[in-house]
C-alpha cells in the first residue's frame, strides 16, 4: 500500500463504489427473479381438506395452479371455496417464509462483504491520515528551513 493521500482517497472511493455495486446487484437479482425464467422462481404449495385441494403459488405472489378433487364438490360450493382459500393462504405463507429466508441470506452475505470493506476502509483512512501528517511535517520542515535560510529579520 502507499502513503500517497490521493491514492488512499481513490482506494476509499473504490470501496464505496464496490459497495454500491453490490447493493445494485442484489436489487437487480431480486427483480430479475420475479420477472425471469418461471423455472427459477421460488414456489410453494398449500393443501387443504386432507389433500383434496392443492394450490401452488410462485415468487411475486402469483397463483400458478389450483387443483380440487371432484369428490369435494359434494360438500357444496361454499365449502370448496373455503378450502381453496385455506390452501392458497398456506401456500402464500410458505412462499413468504422462503422469500424471507432468501432475503436473510442475501443480507447476511452483504453484511459479511461490507464488514470486509469497512475493515479495508479503516486501513485506507489510516494510510490517508498518515500521508497527510507526512505532508504537514514536510511543509513545516520546508517552512523552518526557509526561515533559517533567510536568517534573522
Image (tube, rainbow, N blue to C red):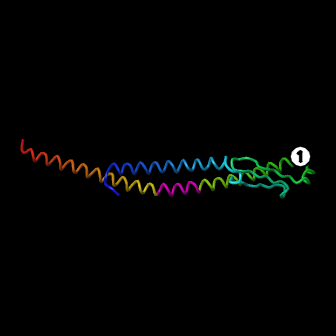
Q: Residue furthest front?
A: 37
Determine which residue is flagged by label 1: 77
Magenta residues, dominant SS class: helix
Residue farthest toward the top in the current orientation of the protein: 153
Q: Report the front residue among 1 and 151.
A: 1
| Residue 93 screen position, x and y as percent | 71, 52
The residue lying at 51 percent from left, 58 percent from top is 112
Tell me where residue 150 sits by quadrant: top left
Q: Residue furthest left?
A: 152
Q: Is residue 52 left or right of residue 94?
A: right
Is residue 4 rendered to the left or right of residue 62? Answer: left
User: Where's the N terminus, which quadrant?
Assistant: bottom left
In x, y percent, where is residue 132? 29, 50
* Residue 86 x/y as whole percent: 79, 51
Residue extending farthest right: 74
Q: Quadrant of the C terminus?
A: top left
31 left or right of 49 in image: left
**Residue at x 51%, y 49% (from the top left corner):** 21
Residue drawn at (37%, 56%) of the image:
123
55 in magenta: no
**In the figure, is residue 44 to the left or right of 117?**
right
Residues drawn in magenta: 105-115
| Residue at 63%, 53% in the rendered image | 100
User: Helix, strand, or loop for circle 1?
Assistant: helix
| Along the viewing direction, whichever of 32 and 104 lies nearer the viewer | 32
Between 111 and 139, the residue placed more toward the observer is 139
The x, y position of residue 81, in whole percent, is 84, 47
Label 1 packing within 10 angstroms: few (<14), some (14-19), many (20+)? few
Amino acid at each position: 500500500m502507499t502513503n500517497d493521500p490521493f491514492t488512499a482517497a481513490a482506494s476509499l472511493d473504490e470501496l464505496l463504489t464496490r459497495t454500491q455495486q453490490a447493493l445494485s446487484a442484489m436489487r437487480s437479482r431480486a427483480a430479475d427473479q420475479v420477472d425471469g425464467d418461471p423455472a427459477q422462481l421460488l414456489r410453494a404449495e398449500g393443501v387443504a381438506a386432507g389433500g383434496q385441494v392443492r394450490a401452488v403459488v410462485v415468487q411475486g405472489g402469483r397463483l400458478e395452479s389450483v387443483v380440487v378433487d371432484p369428490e369435494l364438490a359434494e360438500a357444496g360450493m361454499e365449502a370448496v371455496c373455503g378450502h381453496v382459500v385455506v390452501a392458497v393462504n398456506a401456500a402464500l405463507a410458505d412462499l413468504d417464509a422462503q422469500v424471507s429466508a432468501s432475503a436473510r441470506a442475501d443480507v447476511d452475505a452483504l453484511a459479511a462483504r461490507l464488514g470486509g470493506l469497512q475493515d479495508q476502509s479503516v486501513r485506507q483512512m489510516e494510510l490517508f491520515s498518515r500521508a497527510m501528517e507526512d505532508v504537514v511535517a514536510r511543509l513545516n520542515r520546508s517552512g523552518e528551513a526557509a526561515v533559517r535560510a533567510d536568517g534573522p529579520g
